[in-house]
Each structure stands twice: as C-alpha cells, then as structure tokens.
C-alpha cells in the first residue's frame, strides 16, 4: 500500500542554527549559514516548542519566508512579520532539510479540495500518494515539445468558434475587477470537454475519451465567498469528480500564493505524463500572484522594476506558463488558462503586458458588454488564439470553420464601425446596408455571444 505520510525532508542529517538575527516583514533572517540551497525547506522551532515551516529565498546568509502550517484544524500563522509572543529570535532554532518542497500526488486527488500548501481541506480522508514530485518543476524542453493540436471545447461560442483552444496551448483571460471571470471559469469547468479528431493527427494522437480529461483549478488570493462559490458550483453541477481544486484565501500567508500555482501544475504534470490524461489548468487570479511577488521582493529590499514589481517577474511568470504543452512520446497534454484582473482595466499594466509576451493569445472580457447585460461579455475583437488553426478544420470541427470565424470577425468589426458613425451623423444618415450591419451587431452580441 502507498505510504500516506508526508515527506519527512530528512534524507540527510538536519543542520540546526540558533543564529536568527531578526525579522523583516514576512522574512526571517538567519546569519552564518553554510551552503543554503534556494527553495530549501526549513523548520523553525520557537521558544515554546511550536514549529513553523518556511523556505530559503536568498542564499547570502539565509532569508526564509514563513508560511503557516495547519495543525489539528487550527491555523497558527505568524504573519505578518512573526510578531508573536512566542517568537524570541535568540530562542528560535532553524533546521535545514536540504530538500525543496515536494507534493504527494495520486489519481485520488481528483474530486478533492486542497489549501495553498497542499493540505486536504475537504471532509475526505488523506490522499495516499503514489509519488512525491518537486513542485518547482521546469519548463518543457523546446526540442521535446509537440505542436499543440486538437481542440478543447469550452461550451462558450465566442471561444469555441472564434478563439478555439488547442490541447497544450496557454491562453490567458484578461478581465478586470467586478467582471464575471469567476463565473466564466466555473462555466468552463462544467462544460469543457475534448473534441475527438475523426482520424489521426500529424502526431498520431487520437485519444478523445472523456475519461482522459481532467481539470486542475488553482485559486490564489480569493475571499471566502469566492472559494465557497467555486466549491459549491463544482459540487452542485457534477463537475467536481474530474476537478482537483487548490484554494489559497486572501487571509492566507503570502508565500502560499507563490506555491499554489506550482502545486496545481505539479498535479497536472502527474495526470498528463504519468496517467496520460489531457489536463486543463485554470489559475485565478494571476494578479494576486504577482502582487505576492512584489510583496516578497519589497521585503527583500530588491531594486523594483515597473510599478514596483520585481524585475524577475517575467522569468517567474514564464516558469509557470511554459509548463503547459505536449511532450514527444507522451499521450497526455497540459492546457493552461490563467485568469488575471487588469488593475484599472489597463492592458498596458506589467502583469497583462508580460503575460501577453509569453502566452499564445488572450481572451478579453469587456466592461461595456457586461454593463449591457451580455454574458459572457467576451469582446472578440481584441481576443486572439494564435494556435486556433491547428485545433479546427476538417476532421476536427468543420471544414469551413476558419472561414466562418473570419466572416464573423469582419461583419462584427463593420457593425462596430457603423455604430461609431451613427453616434456622429445620426441613424437617419445611414444607408440600408449600414442598418443591416447594425442589426447583425445587435444579434451577434445578444444571441451569438450569449
């Protein structure tokens, strides 16, 4: 039987230090540490004997960011800044494990709910791990990548018809505060399915069985109401059995927001490459993730980049997004659908700007469509799926899929132009053809998008 215990992080004798120099915000500073390893797991023992866990964030001496560990159903958290009656630097002992964080993975993780540190938080039993995998992972070697092919259906017409998603693609949803991106994410979880290829693709992959499709959902920095919404929606609509849910709440430690997407992607890699499943990974909200990066960077007194975000944010985002794809010789795939809320609805903000450089398109949720009661309020004009051509066509959807999509784009753009002209010259000055364009515009938004 598989071992249900957590990894002990005790492969080598633990090295213990009593050289805690102090605290800077959420960071613990330990001096005179020999050979610290980046991302190494450490254990802090406080003066009263209680323990906290953390990890190495900097190798000059040691800077460890401490996150809470849930014990017996209670949350013992020392954030912010370990301001706690039991914390006395001179009485605090730090043990280094020599290992980075590993996640126990198993097929039984489907249908389960975990917190941002990988602990089970539903009412079910502990998961019996089949393997322990380092959560940091790595981007797929470009030489080993297969070109994304075959379509994943979301059940949303604006996506499936005009911005089709290929298995192995990474395509973000750009939203803003107050828009229904959470509802759209839940709807995709309910409706998403594989589109079976009628024949064999160029890569020879033709497995479209529904049993081979699963979803890993990672929520970062959400409030309790949103967490309850996702959990209740998945359970009530019967999609929970194929979903693995990781929830990091807004009042959880900052470091968990850094860990949560890595837990989700590690789980997806196990499903895809060991269980040969096609996995859709939904990550929300990447803005909360990037703000956590900024908070940690400020505590480490790093030189800030654009708008205070760390200069390494592009590399950090790429280390997550580039874990999506298909690998030569493996039947499974990982498709990524990160969701981010653009601050002040500004698409030039560093978070959507850098995300757009790394990913393969974007789906744009529009405030004006939402204000007019259109759901889902997806604006197809700034939206784009760069890999759509490999996911559609004869044998997959329909032979004229690309032509239909192009015609819809052209007519919708014409309708928007006429609507702008009407605001200037009035409807009386419009020709019969212009009025037909306006009629198409209204029906497209009221019937096709909705």
Image (tube, rainbow, N blue to C red):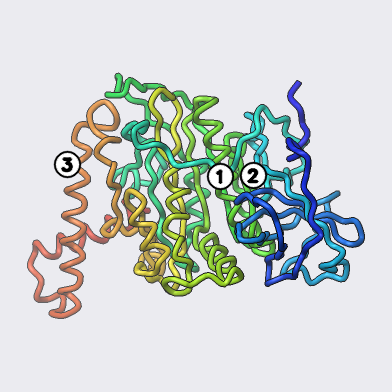
Per the model, the C-alpha gap separating discs 1 and 3 is: 42 Å
Q: Residue shown at 14%/64% (left/top)?
A: 435
Q: Is residue 225 left or right of residue 418?
A: right
The image quarter containing residue 80 is: bottom right
* Residue sticking out furthest to the right: 48
Question: Who is closer to the viewer here, 175 or 259?
Answer: 259
Residue receiving disc 3: 403
* Above/below status of 387 relative to 338: above
Label 1, secondary structure: give it.
loop
Residue receiving disc 1: 136
Q: Nearer the viewer, mark 1 or mark 3?
A: 1
Per the model, the C-alpha gap separating discs 2 and 3 is: 50 Å
* Above/below status of 179 relative to 344: above
Q: Nearer the viewer, mark 2 or mark 3?
A: 2
- Determine contact: label 1, label 2, CB under 8 Å: yes
Q: Nearer the viewer, mark 1 or mark 2?
A: 2
Dot 2 surroundings within 10 Å: few (below 14), some, or many (20 or more)?
Answer: some
Label 3, secondary structure: give it.
helix
Picture disc at residue 100: 2
Q: Is residue 347 visible?
A: yes
């Amino acid at each position: 039987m598989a071992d249900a215990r957590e990894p002990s992080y005790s492969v080598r004798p633990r090295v213990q230090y009593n050289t805690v120099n102090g605290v800077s915000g959420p960071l613990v500073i330990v001096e005179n540490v020999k050979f610290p390893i980046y991302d190494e797991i450490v254990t802090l023992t406080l003066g009263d004997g209680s323990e906290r866990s953390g990890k190495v964030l900097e190798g000059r001496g040691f800077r460890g960011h401490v996150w809470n560990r849930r014990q017996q159903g209670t949350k013992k958290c020392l954030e912010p800044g370990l301001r706690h009656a039991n914390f006395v630097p001179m009485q605090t002992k730090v043990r280094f494990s020599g290992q980075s964080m590993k996640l126990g993975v198993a097929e039984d993780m489907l249908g389960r709910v975990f917190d941002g540190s990988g602990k089970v938080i539903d009412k079910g039993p502990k998961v019996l791990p089949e393997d322990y995998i380092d959560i940091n992972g790595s981007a797929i070697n470009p030489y080993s990548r297969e070109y994304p092919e075959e379509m994943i259906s979301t059940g949303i017409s604006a996506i499936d018809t005009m911005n089709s998603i290929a298995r192995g693609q990474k395509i973000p949803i750009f939203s803003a505060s107050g828009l229904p991106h959470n509802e759209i994410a839940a709807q995709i979880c309910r409706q998403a399915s594989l589109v079976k290829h009628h024949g064999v693709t160029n890569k020879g992959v033709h497995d479209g069985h529904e049993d081979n499709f699963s979803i890993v959902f990672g929520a970062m920095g959400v409030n309790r109401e949103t967490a309850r919404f996702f959990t209740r929606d998945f359970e009530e609509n019967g999609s929970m059995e194929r979903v693995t849910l990781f929830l990091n709440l807004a009042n959880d430690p900052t470091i968990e927001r850094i860990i949560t997407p890595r837990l989700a992607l590690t789980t997806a890699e196990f499903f895809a490459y060991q269980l040969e499943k096609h996995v859709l990974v939904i990550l929300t909200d990447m803005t909360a993730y990037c703000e956590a990066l900024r908070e940690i960077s400020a505590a480490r007194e790093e030189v800030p980049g654009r708008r205070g975000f760390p200069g390494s944010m592009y590399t950090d985002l790429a280390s997550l997004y580039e874990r999506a794809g298909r690998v030569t010789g493996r039947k499974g795939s990982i498709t990524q659908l990160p969701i981010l809320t653009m601050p002040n609805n500004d698409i030039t903000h560093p978070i959507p700007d850098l995300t757009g450089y790394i990913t393969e398109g974007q789906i744009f949720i529009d405030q004006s469509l939402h204000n007019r009661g259109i759901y889902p309020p997806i604006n197809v004009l700034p939206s784009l799926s760069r890999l759509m051509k490999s996911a559609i066509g004869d044998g997959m959807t329909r032979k004229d899929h690309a032509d239909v999509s192009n015609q819809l784009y052209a007519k919708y753009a014409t309708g928007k132009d006429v609507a702008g002209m009407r605001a200037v010259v009035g409807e009386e000055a419009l020709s019969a053809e212009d009025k037909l364009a306006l009629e198409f515009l209204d029906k497209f938004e009221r019937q096709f998008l909705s």
